[in-house]
Amino acid sequence: MENASLPSDVWNNGTTSSSDDDVQPLNLTNISRLAFRIIYIIVGTVGVLDNLFVLIVFILFIKVTDKVLTILNRVLRKMI
């Protein structure tokens, strides 16, 4: 049974929660999700760049060892 003494707008405003309470947690969760996404993107990018750096160092190490081995072989052949 509806309350006939109160207009419907007043009754609805009095019984429902205010929109300010609903908006604040939604904004905080959206901001935290966005922050986590940005952090994950940054960490992922740094991880990929780190792996590329390791590969480049490994390739350069192989090239340097090939050069050192050729020089070492020449020196050893001259000694024998």
Image (tube, rainbow, N blue to C red):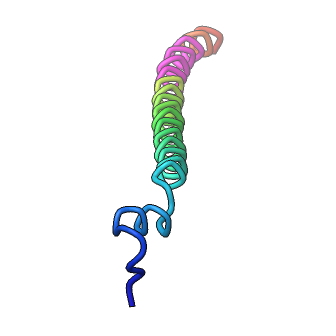
Q: Residue at x 54, y 53 (%)?
A: 21
Say which of 58 and 19 sits in front.
Answer: 19
Q: Is residue 70 above or below residue 15?
A: above
- Residue 70 is inside the magenta segment: yes
Figure quadrant of the N terminus = bottom left
State left or right for residue 75 relative to residue 18: right
Residue 5 image offset from top left, x and y in percent: 42, 75
Say which of 46 and 24 sits in front.
Answer: 24
What span is colored magenta in the figure?
58-73
Q: Quadrant of residue 73?
A: top right
Q: Residue at x 50, y 41 (%)?
A: 31
Q: Quadrant of residue 52?
A: top left
Residue 39 image offset from top left, x and y in percent: 53, 37
Q: Is residue 77 above or below residue 6?
A: above
- Residue 47 is inside the magenta segment: no
Which residue of the protein is positioned furthest toward the bottom in this rendering?
Answer: 1
Q: Is residue 60 above or below residue 37?
A: above
Q: Residue at x 46, y 32 (%)?
A: 45
Say which of 34 and 52 sits in front.
Answer: 34
Q: Residue at x 38, y 84 (%)?
A: 2
Q: How many marks?
A: 0
Main structural element of the magenta stretch: helix, strand or loop? helix
Residue 68 image offset from top left, x and y in percent: 57, 15
Which residue of the protein is positioned furthest toward the right in this rendering?
Answer: 79
Q: Is residue 8 above or below residue 60?
A: below
State left or right for residue 57 relative to residue 6: right
Say which of 75 and 48 sits in front.
Answer: 48
